[in-house]
Image (cartoon, grey):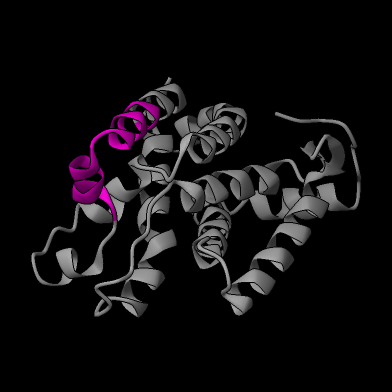
Amino acid sequence: MVTLCIIVVTSVVSYLSFNNVKLGEDLILWPPAITRNREYYRLVTYGLVHADMQHVFFNMLTLFFFGRALEPFFAMAMGATGFALFYLGALVVSVLPSYLQNRNNPRYRCLGASGAVSAVMFAFILLQPWSKIFVLFLPLPAIMYAVLYVAYSVMMSKQGNDDVNHGAHLWGAAYGVVFTLVMSPAVLPIFLNQLTHPRWGFGP
């Protein structure tokens, strides 16, 4: 239910912001609003608005598949609000380096839940490294997809020639792994054991 609530709220707010410029501007991560006006809520609300329908659709679709598989795990470890707390933390941690780097840049804007979704996806991969993930309709082991995802994000982050915050994707992925291991250290030996015993085809 937590995953569905996040999806519904994010989708509704994103849709409303497409036709309400002021709403989007009030929620987006704009460094001067935080640095000068202390609007710290923007470190979370930027994840409620997206560039277009395709952006919000793919983020929420990914969140649906991986979030619903992860939610019971966090509920057992942290209680009913565990997954919500994990997701909110992912929003903040994934974008914080970008904000600090651009805190004096009035031209910088950041929006979208991609960093938090990356955290969800990598937490899931840590739990089920051999699950099947479809990339352009091609099935890949989750652990292989993780390696390719990180390599691509690092490469694109260095090039910096598009409008995608690849750094947030990387920080989100790192947060997903570290948070899960800190919360449940027993996950690490289980993960390492699974790597040596492939079970291809298991998924969310």
For residue 140, which quarter of the picture? top right
| Nearer to the camera, 130 or 153 | 153
Indicate left or right for 111 with 69 as reference. Answer: left
- Residue displayed at 49% across by 53% down: 115
The C terminus, quarter of image = top right
The N terminus, quarter of image = top left
Indicate left or right for 137 with 21 as reference. Answer: right
Q: Is residue 147 above or below residue 107?
A: above
Q: Position of residue 126 (x, y in %)?
A: 68, 49
Range of residues picked out in magenta? 10-28
Q: Position of residue 145 (x, y in %)?
A: 78, 51
- Residue displayed at 34% across by 62% down: 109
- Residue displayed at 41% across by 43% down: 50
Indicate left or right for 68 with 47 as reference. Answer: right
Q: Is residue 184 above or below residue 74?
A: below
Residue 21 within the segment the image draws in magenta = yes
Residue 94 within the segment the image draws in magenta = no
Outermost residue, top side: 1
Q: Is residue 20 above or below residue 99?
A: above
Outermost residue, left side: 37
- Residue displayed at 46% across by 27% down: 3
Q: Position of residue 137 (x, y in %)?
A: 83, 34
Q: Is residue 33 above or below residue 10?
A: below
Q: Position of residue 22 (x, y in %)?
A: 18, 44
| Nearer to the camera, 42 or 93 | 42
